[in-house]
Amino acid sequence: PRSGPVAGSLYPTKPGEPIRRAVNDKERKEASLLAHNMWMDNPPGKQNCHFLDMTFDEVGPQGINIVPEKAFDDSAQWNYLEGMLSDKVDSDTAEQIKLAHQKLPTLFQQIKSDKTITYPSQYDCVTGSYKYTELEEN
């Protein structure tokens, strides 16, 4: 059975650019790093997930509100991409991105958050005390 292309076999390209294949180990490593960096990087806009709203206090960012019912509408697209999907990618890719953004909030609702900070201080936000007193003393 054939598998699809791997990150290291092609250099990342923008829509309409010619495909550039990696032909040796050095190029495959370079193409792989470029592709994975692109996948893991922030979007070009100012908001990563349309349904996550940062909260602030007088010091700065202090939390996140999860709003799963928030639609991935034109405003959300603009905040995510600094433009519209239809202007950045082909229609099939745009539909896949929209679908992913519609499904992702459901996954976030399934995550159970632990109110205990586990690194580095082991501080229990519920009781207001350190879980390991030796950390508080040192």
Image: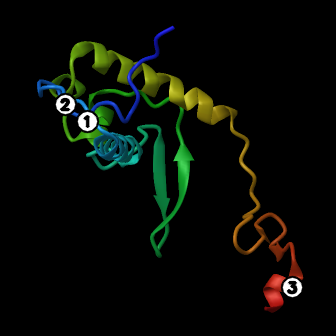
N-term-proximal mark, 2 vs 3: 2
Residue 86 location (% of width, % of height): 19, 22
Residue at the spot x=20%, y=33% of the render? Answer: 13
Residue receiving disc 1: 11
Query: Is 9 displayed left or right of 84 in the figure?
Result: right
Query: Is 129 displayed left or right of 104 in the figure?
Result: right
Q: Which amino acid is tagged 1?
A: Tyr
Q: Which of marks 1 and 3 is in front?
A: 1
**Measured along the vertical axis of the image, is residue 31 above or below residue 138?**
above
Q: Which amino acid is tagged 2?
A: Arg
Check disc 3 and report its element: helix, strand or loop: helix
Q: Which of marks 2 and 3 is in front?
A: 2
N-term-proximal mark, 1 vs 2: 1
**Measured along the vertical axis of the image, is residue 125 above or below residue 28?**
below
Location of residue 91 (image quadrant): top left
Check disc 1 and report its element: helix, strand or loop: loop
Mark 2 crowdedness (10 Å alpha carbons): few <14, some 14-19, many ≥20: few
Tell me the CA gap for discs 2 and 3.
56 Å
* Circles 1 and 3 in contact, beta carbons < 8 Å: no
Residue at the spot x=64%, y=33% of the render? Answer: 109
**Measured along the vertical axis of the image, is residue 115 above or below residue 48?**
below
Mark 3 crowdedness (10 Å alpha carbons): few <14, some 14-19, many ≥20: few
Residue 72 location (% of width, % of height): 38, 28
Check disc 2 and report its element: helix, strand or loop: loop
Residue receiving disc 3: 134
Tell me the CA gap for discs 1 and 2.
6 Å
* Circles 1 and 2 in contact, beta carbons < 8 Å: yes
Residue 20's mark? 2
Mark 1 crowdedness (10 Å alpha carbons): few <14, some 14-19, many ≥20: some
